[in-house]
Amino acid sequence: MSEVTVRQLADVVGTPVGRLLEQLREAGIGVDREDAAITEAQKLQLLRYLRHSHGASVEIATPKRITLNRRSHSEIQVNAGGGRSKTVNVEVRKKRTYIKRSAILEQERLAERQREEEEAQAGVQAQQEREARLIAEEEAKRQAAEEEAKRQAAEEEAKRQAAEEEAKRQAEAQVKRRLDVEKKPKNGLEPARTEKPASRKAKPRFRSEDRESEQKQRGTKFGRKELHIAPGKAGTSKRKKFRPQKAAPAAKHGFERPTAPIVHDVSIPETMTVAELAQKMSVKAAEVIKALMKLGIMATINQVLDQDTATIVVEEMGHKPKRLQENTLELELVQAEQEVSRQVSRAAVVTIMGHVDHGKTSLLDYIRRAKVATSEAGGITQHIGAYKVRSDKGEITFIDTPGHAAFTAMRARGAKVTDIVILVVAADDGAMPQTVEAIQHARAAGAPLVVAVNKIDRPDADPDRVKQELANHDVITEEWGGDTQFVNVSAKTGEGIDDLIEAILLQAEVMEIKVSAEGPARGVVIESRLDKGRGPVATILVQSGTLRKGDILLSGVETGRVRAMLTERGQEIIEAGPSTPVEILGLSGTPNAGDEAVVVPDERRAREIAGHRQAKEREVKLARQQSAKLENMFNEMEEGEIRALNLVIKADVQGSAEALSDSLTKLSTDKARVKVVAAGVGGINETDVNLAVASNAVIIGFNVRADAAARRLIAEKGIDLHYYSVIYNAIDEIKGALIGILDPEYREEIIGLARVDDVFRSPKLGAIAGCLVIEGSVRRNNPIRVLRDNIVVFEGQLESLRRFKDDVQEVRAGTECGIGVKDYKDVKVGDQIEVYERVRKEPAL
């Protein structure tokens, strides 16, 4: 049908009629009656609004391909033989597929794009081949030129050597001729010189040498001429044909051993490894390890040292330590922010604290006209909720914190960001443990208190009792001369609510809360969780500046661009000023509750700071683990007999996971302990199940569920999985499980003692002890011990117990009886038979 009524549509989609009417009004459809008709266009408009509000695309997917099957039936007559005909049923099936034209065009575009990419790739490949061919040709030319140069150098070397040999040969011949000429015959006549002188070309080269040779030949030694041998032959001649040049001295390296030790300025971060420290001091890692051993620290080359230890080592090795400030990047970020001088008043941030079930959330519900506790499991608040309330007298930002004892850390975080603390105390219950704890948190945060005495409408309400009990904790009302405002209220009837708001606004006016509304926003993470459809979601309270959609946000080790901002009612906004709580989408992960959130102008800078924080956190964690290994070695040896219960905890928000982990860990005792293997945010997936299998752990799901793949793996591996929505139930069941893994204890109790006065021999039963029961009673089915001189000589059971000739089950003190001990025949007079029983004691933590 094309039109349906609101009630019919509500029945189809399974939602209340009132909720559907509210959604229709929010979608801009003017329908306010249950019997009003809704058209197809209005239903489509409602569907687009709902998809947009959940962060999905407003476009509605339509099928790209439709296949139609058509069947037709007919009958035909066929000849069956013998003049008979037979009717045969014929079914014709036709199948036709219609493809959306846009899909065909999309396929054609994809094919065209693929063809262009292939052509581009082919062109790139051809270009690469051409470049490779050119490179090969250039390499071949270079090799040919090198070969030609080598060949020419070899030819020139050969010519030079040939010329040197020829010159040497001519010089030797000339010297020989001169020696022959100088020889005189016996008649004293000198023969005429018939040989030609040496060539003119060779004379200039050897003229000085020849003159020196002639002078030496004319000299005499021991009365006779001294014979000189020509150069080139063996002898003592000082003449040399070649005077080779001196070889160039080898290049001397620039390193010289220092005459004094070099002192380095060593920059020391908060954590660094031994290898990094050795590199900064320009020494070997073994030297650093030796210095650590002298200090009594056994370390390896990859050991992580803290800043103090590294400073001591540097000083011991004679260098100057220089401590680095690890938050340099953060300080630069703060200095780079714009200084804005204009200060504006902001709404006071008010935290509501108090004991569980004293009406904190109900009081806040009445103030902001909404129901919060009904959405919480068990009617208690287990998350931190931040809400901005607008009244006629001003705006107030409320932070509601859980009152249960397990959420101490969450309440502490609530007190850190608050300006004013409202302490809710039930008028019929008085001050309780969490009430005192809230007072301590408020004092630690330096926030003033405003006491709201709730449940004033009850008949047993006693506000004076509340004032007296709080006065014992130094919280004194103004009526008694103190400085704390007490307001009597009733979250049920609304009595005193206006007075409470006036008290809050008055306190805020006295405090003069002012911040800068311009420049980059700064805030604090109130809570974070992992949403299946939207990813990481963080609740941030803006403290200064203005947070806008599209800003780059840095929180702890997580960073990202703000994709969307939602109020506590789910309305999307573009910007948020000071004291405004918003839900942020777009971070890379779930930050820890309490982390500072700041807007960074540069995304690269944000990632750099986040990476630096993550590395620092990892190094600190590694150093802590390594330092604890030796200290916990003996404890782990002793804990070999302690039973342990391993847990993998997954919760919907970070605060719940932290609180549940702390509460369950505190259940550990010296007999059994709880070990939280992992605690995280989000649904239970296959990774969590595999971790539970590896560590033999139980999976705890707090307000989360396992996905389909995880459920299949849990059923296959037989993992124990428990779902909880109230923290009380989780603590009680885990405590019961701890008791269950302990072995029961057995204690022996002596119930009777009999003295052997005589021993009788029976042909059937053997030795029968005639006894007198002196203490308690002797029972037939209980175990016994035979004592001789107060020493146990036998343990066993009774074979028979008789009173005269009758078999009895029990004999009391002061009565004689006959006792036969099974498998023991050495009973003597004076022995004692002790009867006892084993009593089981249930284990307890």
Image (cartoon, rainbow, N blue to C red):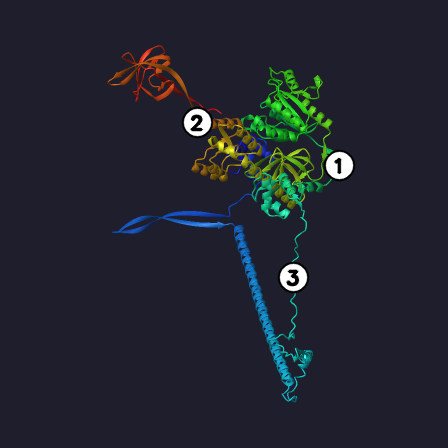
Q: Residue at x 42, y 47 (%)?
A: 70
Judging by the rendered image, the residue that carries numbered circle 1 is 342
Q: Residue at x 38, y 18 (%)?
A: 790
Upstream in the sequence, badge 3 or badge 1?
A: 3
Q: Nearer the viewer, residue 703 or 557?
A: 557
Quick one: SS at disc 3?
Answer: loop
Mark toward the viewer: 3 or 1: 3
Upstream in the sequence, badge 3 or badge 2?
A: 3
Mark toward the viewer: 3 or 2: 3
Q: Is residue 69 among the parts visible in the rendering?
A: yes
Crowd tier of the residue under label 3, counting other residues whose Cα lies within 10 Å: few below 14, some 14–19, many 20 or above: few
Judging by the rendered image, the residue that carries numbered circle 2 is 743
Q: Residue at x 45, y 29 (%)?
A: 741
Q: Amino acid at mark 2?
A: Asp
Mark toward the viewer: 2 or 1: 2
Vertical position of residue 243 compared to residue 476: above or below: below
Q: Nearer the viewer, residue 117 or 772?
A: 772
x and y percent of residue 506 in the render? 72, 25
Seen from this angle, which residue lies furthest front? 223
Cα separation between marks 3 and 1? 70 Å
Quick one: SS at disc 2?
Answer: loop
Q: Amino acid at mark 1?
A: Arg
Judging by the rendered image, the residue that carries numbered circle 3 is 251
Q: Is residue 586 among the parts visible in the rendering?
A: no
Q: Amino acid at mark 3?
A: Ala
Horizontally, is 828 left or right of 583 in the view?
left
Q: Quadrant of residue 216?
A: bottom right
Q: Residue at x 64, y 62 (%)?
A: 250
